[in-house]
Image (cartoon, grey):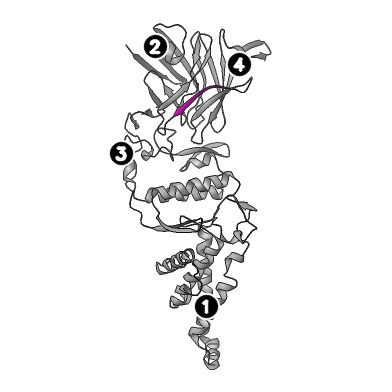
């Protein structure tokens, strides 16, 4: 028989638990039916109303410390059996034998394992599937006590009596992959999946978390010491002002907008001399996000230049059109007419001069890979700095050479020059052809 009473109080919360297997599940003393009261001291200044102290009546006390996530637990009141992990804390009016444990988290905030403060060894660990269902668990045993402090999935504490997670606003059932109550936040009409009241993080627990049980969010970060949630879990790992974070945020938006199985765009995938066209579907965005993360972890961060690339294209097209107008309008147009020069040939000469001169970005250090090595390649050999894709633009990684091809075609369209001028002269392979065509597409779409 299972009975669960929950009483909420102004200054904290009490849980009255009654379960025959409490010793096995909760780590209580004695294999018998026992009623245990736990008093909580809650930090109401924290975003998640974190528990600072848990005290069992006549039993063990747990004190927790937090940074961006839960850092450690100090356990008081262990009668015996703590052994090598036990240490003594000294106070002005006495001392206490304690066990201090450190939390080790995944990038989503899930507790993977605990280490002790004495030897630094793993004392307990838990493995989960992507939805939080337990696949393996080892908890710390201290004499007759079993302390299950390790089972926390994306900051949600596991309730072993109910077999679900306490997700603040409501309970989450990892086995069913659903919340057990309706969502207080009703979602947005622009995102139909958010209107389903029991769905957990839009059915994508690899990307999202839901710390409050009300709204998908991700990662922890602080602004002036205040907790904030951002719509990408990488805020926990990368700076929110970093190029990596900006790229991942944009990829997340593109992933959401990509209808599953129906990509509206394609791109090229190249490697080992092979160039192939691939669909820009959700799988593509997920794989690119993983690549961007790995580059950042290797100190080979990609750069987010979405706006800068478009500004560059607009500026160059503006210069080209201004040059063309100078051949037709005003005093300069009169002198050009008298010179006998050909307007078309001069326009072509301007485009070629730009493509081979100041618009040839593979020779511009600002657009080249700045690292001595990048993705395992030596960047100072065979012009690798020119050819390696490291600039993020439009959901793609672009090289300095790619940018030059895209720029030439974009400007050529804006100058109303025939395509053979820029499609034939500078295209040496499929990769060049792709970026020339993409520059054409950008210009024709009015971007």
Q: Is residue 321 above or below residue 246?
A: below
Position above or below: 3 against 206: above
The quadrant in which the C terminus is found is bottom left
Q: In which quadrant of the rendered image does the N terminus lie? A: top left
Which disc is residue 196 wearing? 3
Q: Nearer the viewer, residue 323 or 25?
A: 25
SS assignment at label 2? loop
Where, by quadrant of the figure, is residue 213 drawn? top left
Is residue 132 placed above or below 271 in the rendered structure? above
The residue to which callout 1 is attached is 322
The answer to whether 283 is drawn above or below residue 444 in the figure is above
* Residue drawn 55% across the image and 55% down it: 390
- The mark that comes first in sequence, 1 or 4, is 4
Marks 2 and 4, how far apart in space? 26 Å
Residue 66 placement (x, y as % from top left): 56, 28
Label 1 with label 3: CB-CB less than 8 Å: no
Query: Is residue 191 left or right of 435 when viewed as pictured?
Result: left
Residue 413 placement, left or right of 67: left
Q: Indicate yes or no whether the magenta region holds residue 194.
A: no
Q: Main secondary structure of the magenta part?
A: strand
> Looking at the image, which is closer to me, 413 or 314?
413
The residue labelled by disc 4 is 85
């Amino acid at each position: 028989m299972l009975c669960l009473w929950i009483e909420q109080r102004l200054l904290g919360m009490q849980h009255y638990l009654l379960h025959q297997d409490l010793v096995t599940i909760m780590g209580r003393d004695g294999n018998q039916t026992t009623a245990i009261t736990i008093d909580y001291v809650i930090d109401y200044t924290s975003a998640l109303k974190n528990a600072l102290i848990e005290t069992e009546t006549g039993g063990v006390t747990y004190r927790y410390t937090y940074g961006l996530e839960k850092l450690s637990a100090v356990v008081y009141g262990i009668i015996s059996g703590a052994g090598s992990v036990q240490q003594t804390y000294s106070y002005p009016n006495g001392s206490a034998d304690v066990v201090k444990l450190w939390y080790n988290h995944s990038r989503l905030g899930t507790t993977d394992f605990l280490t002790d403060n004495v030897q630094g060894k793993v004392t307990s660990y838990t493995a989960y599937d992507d939805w939080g269902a337990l696949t393996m668990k080892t908890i710390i045993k201290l004499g007759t006590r079993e302390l299950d402090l390790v089972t926390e999935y994306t900051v949600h504490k596991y309730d072993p009596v109910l077999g679900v997670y306490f997700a603040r606003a409501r309970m989450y059932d990892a086995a069913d992959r659903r919340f057990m109550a309706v969502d207080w936040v009703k979602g947005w009409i622009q995102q139909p999946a958010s209107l389903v009241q029991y769905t957990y993080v839009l059915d994508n627990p690899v990307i999202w978390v839901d710390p409050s049980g009300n709204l998908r969010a991700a990662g922890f970060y602080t602004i002036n010491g205040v907790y904030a949630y951002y719509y990408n879990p990488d805020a926990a790992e990368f700076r929110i002002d970093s190029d990596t974070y900006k790229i991942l945020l944009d990829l997340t938006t593109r992933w959401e907008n990509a209808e599953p199985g129906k990509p509206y765009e394609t791109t090229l995938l190249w490697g080992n001399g092979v160039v192939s066209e691939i669909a820009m579907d959700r799988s593509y965005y997920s794989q690119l996000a993983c690549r961007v993360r790995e580059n950042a972890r290797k100190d080979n961060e990609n750069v987010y230049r979405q706006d800068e690339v478009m500004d560059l294209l607009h500026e160059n097209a503006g210069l080209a059109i201004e040059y063309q107008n100078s051949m037709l309008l005003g005093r300069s147009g009169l002198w050009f007419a008298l010179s006998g020069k050909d307007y078309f040939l001069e326009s072509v000469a301007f485009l070629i001069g730009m493509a081979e001169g100041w618009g040839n970005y593979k020779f511009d250090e600002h657009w080249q890979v700045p690292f001595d090595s990048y993705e395992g390649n030596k960047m100072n050999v065979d012009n690798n700095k020119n050819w390696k894709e490291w600039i993020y633009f439009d959901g793609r990684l672009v090289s300095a050479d790619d940018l030059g091809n895209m720029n030439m075609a974009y400007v050529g369209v804006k100058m109303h020059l025939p395509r053979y001028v820029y499609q034939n002269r500078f295209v040496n392979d499929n990769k060049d052809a792709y970026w020339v065509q993409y520059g054409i597409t950008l210009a024709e779409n009015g971007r």
